[in-house]
Amino acid sequence: MNASNIKGALLEYLVRRLLANCGFMSVYPDNLYTYVSGGLFYVNGRGAAHDADVLMEPPVQMPFSYPSRILFECKAYGSKATLSIIRNALGLKYDINEFEVVTKNSLIQRMNNRRSNYAIEHRKRYSYQVGVASAGDFSKPAIEFAANNRIPLLSLAWFMDPSAVDAFQSINQPYIDDIDSEIVAKVYAFLKDREHDADQANRNQTARDYLRSDAKVGRVIAAFDNIIERLFVGLIESGDLVFLFAENLYAAYRFTDLQRLTGLQGRIHYSQQRPDLWNLSVAEDFQRENVAEFNFFVPQIIMDLWRQYSLDRERAVQIKGEFFSRIFVFNKGIRPELPFFVINIDREWLNQVRERQENLG
């Protein structure tokens, strides 16, 4: 087996688990519009059937629209993902969303104004969002094109320790060739398993046993497991994802408790020493002791905007109010009937910060 196959399957596995952690559910083939062939999952489009690396449904659907699905193209490259990859993802998005079954018989029926049947296929239709996941980062043209065309991006480098990303990138052919071929096949099957219970202990036990001591694939999965315990995924006003890391397990548990409350408020701080790493404080009432602290990296496109103003403090206050006025945080499926909760920025606090900056200026 090629090392690229293992790396690709590993990236798919991590993305699936990250989405599952937000309450997303795997899609299973209907054997017509979606189907499995040669171990790959396909979605039919207008021009062709496309291999869907990761295909899942969100924990909640919007009314008055087709139910949505998210499809992630996974690119396990050693270099930055480039503009051409994002362009291909946009083409894929159009092809699968504009797919419709039109037969000769249905066209003939259209000519008959007194027809008894509609000239459309009776099926459940979906609105597909297509994103790109990468082991490394993205080039600036790729980020700009993705933002302008609403293509969500995801990189392991945004939320995993650099040593774990290095371990991922170090997976090469000599490493794969040094492992028993039967074990490699079982590991690959484990990583590609889309079943809801794929992470239960009674499945893929041979692969699990091997990965506990493996220095590369196992190392990456162990690092991910450690992160996922204190990682929450949020969506900000711009549509960008932010990865909220609890400063400790206590904060993660408090956040789980806080999500049962309404009226959550947030305050955001940063330091000049590390301007791209911000801190989010969350509480129902900041006059009390129950304040949960989280760190997150500012999305690159927002950092680029801020840098145009030389990281000006007043502009930072504007960015907080414009892009972080509300943060929708997925609650890890703890409450399926309400899969996310909303953190509103503390407007009184933000106005006080703005007044202080104006007085200093």
Image: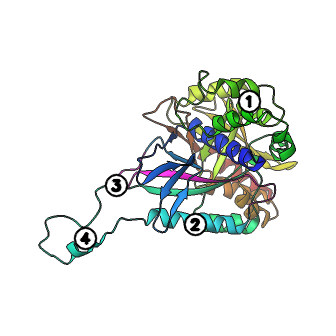
Of tags 4 and 1, which is closer to the observer? 4
39 sits left or right of 166 in the view = left
Q: What amino acid type is highlighted by mark number 3?
A: Phe
**Which comes before the other along the chain, label 2 or label 4?**
2
Q: Earlier in the sequence, mark 3 or mark 1?
A: 3
The magenta-colored residue range is 61-81
* Amino acid carrying mark 4 in the image: Asn
Mark 3 neighbour class, 10 Å CA radius: few under 14, some 14 to 19, many 20 or more: few
Q: Nearer the viewer, residue 288 or 213?
A: 213
Residue position marked by numbered label 2 in the rendering: 90
**Secondary element at tag 2:** helix
Q: Where is residue 70 in the image (x, y as percent from the top left)?
A: 53, 51
Residue 64 got which mark?
3
Q: Residues within 10 Å of mark 1 (few under 14, many from 20)?
A: few
Q: Nearer the viewer, mark 2 or mark 4?
A: 4
User: Which sits earlier in the primary sequence, circle 4 or circle 3?
Assistant: 3
- Quarter where residue 225 is shown: top right
Residue depicted at x 11% and y 72%: 114
Find the distance from the CA under tag 4 to the CA under tag 3. Answer: 30 Å
Magenta stretch, main secondary structure, is loop
Residue highlighted by disc 1:
226
Sooner in the amino-acid sequence: mark 2 or mark 3: 3
Distance from the alpha carbon under mark 4 to that under mark 1:
56 Å
**Quarter of the image with the N terminus in it:** top right
Residues at badges 3 and 1 in contact (C-beta under 8 Å)?
A: no
Instruction: Provide the residue designation for mark 4.
Output: 105
- Check residue 64 for magenta coloring: yes
